[in-house]
Image (spheres, grey):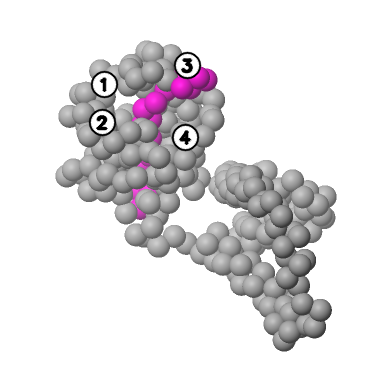
Amino acid sequence: MDSQEARKILALFRPGSADEKDPWFQQARQLAQTDPELGQWFSSHCESYLSLRQKLQAIPVPPGLKEQILSERKIQRTLFQKYWPRLLAAAALAAMLAVLAYDILPFHAADHFAAYRKRMTESALRSYSMDLMTSDPGRIREFLKQKDAPADYSLPSALEKAEAVGCVVSHWQGSPVSMICFKSGRPLPPGEQSDLWLFVIDRQAASNSPAPSSPVFARVNKATTASWSDDNKSYLLATVGEEAFLQKYLQ
């Protein structure tokens, strides 16, 4: 079994379900433990599945919905009800094929950086733990270098003056990503350690990166992001706030 075949199988894997003990997934899961790129993809797949399931479970059931459905149910079956199992099976197959197409087929160039921007920003908005906590920029660069993550990055002068609090080494499609965390000086929510995040990746690892000329702004959930490139690096700066607030760190 090669990596591509294992990815097709693992795209159907549902973490936290009976699939955990299903021998059909065993060989593919073992390969994911030895193949770093496949392992990173599989980890992201599981995170996305669990996040989606949690959101679906959080949707409240309207009061009296069950009783309403039962009261409106007709005794005589309609043609739609008769063929409902077949329609449901067809819909499930279509959904599975859509998942396989998204996970297996390569990203279109126009979507690749947008997918990277979304994944990195959402990781900052969720709970995360820093690999290194320090306000010393030199120690951050040294730590990232030791972890083979981008460390020779260039910061806008305004961002250099911001208070650093640490860093995290992440990955995108098998390539290391440096996440440097800063404080903007605004009051932080309870339990939060930073509110300004910079992601740095080799430019060739995130195709369709923005041109070096000027930052490209985009919204990701409740965050505002600015993306730009410089030499062989691509940069992504994110925070919860408006574009004008982020703009001052790009000067």
Amino acid on which disc 4 is placed: Leu
Q: Please give the residue where the numbered disc 1 appears in the rendered image.
A: 160
Q: Please give the residue where the numbered disc 4 appears in the rendered image.
A: 125
* Marks 2 and 1, how far apart at CA: 16 Å
In the image: residue 248, left or right of residue 220: left
**Residue depth check, mark 1 versus mark 4: number of the one nearer the observer:** 4
3 or 2: tag closer to the N-terminus: 3
1 or 4: tag closer to the N-terminus: 4
Q: Is residue 199 magenta?
A: yes
2 or 1: tag closer to the N-terminus: 1
Q: State the SS at label 2.
A: helix
Q: Please give the residue where the numbered disc 2 appears in the rendered image.
A: 245
Q: State the SS at label 1.
A: helix
Q: Farthest bottom residue?
A: 79
In this view, 3 is above or below 239: below
Amino acid on which disc 2 is placed: Phe
Which disc, if any, is residue 228?
none
The residue located at (27%, 32%) in the rendering is 246
**Residue depth check, mark 2 versus mark 1: number of the one nearer the observer:** 2
Magenta segment range?
Answer: 189-207
1 or 3: tag closer to the N-terminus: 3
Amino acid on which disc 1 is placed: Glu
The residue located at (46%, 34%) in the rendering is 124
**Residue depth check, mark 3 versus mark 2: number of the one nearer the observer:** 2
Which disc, if any, is residue 133?
3
Q: Are marks 2 and 1 in contact (CB under 8 Å)?
A: no
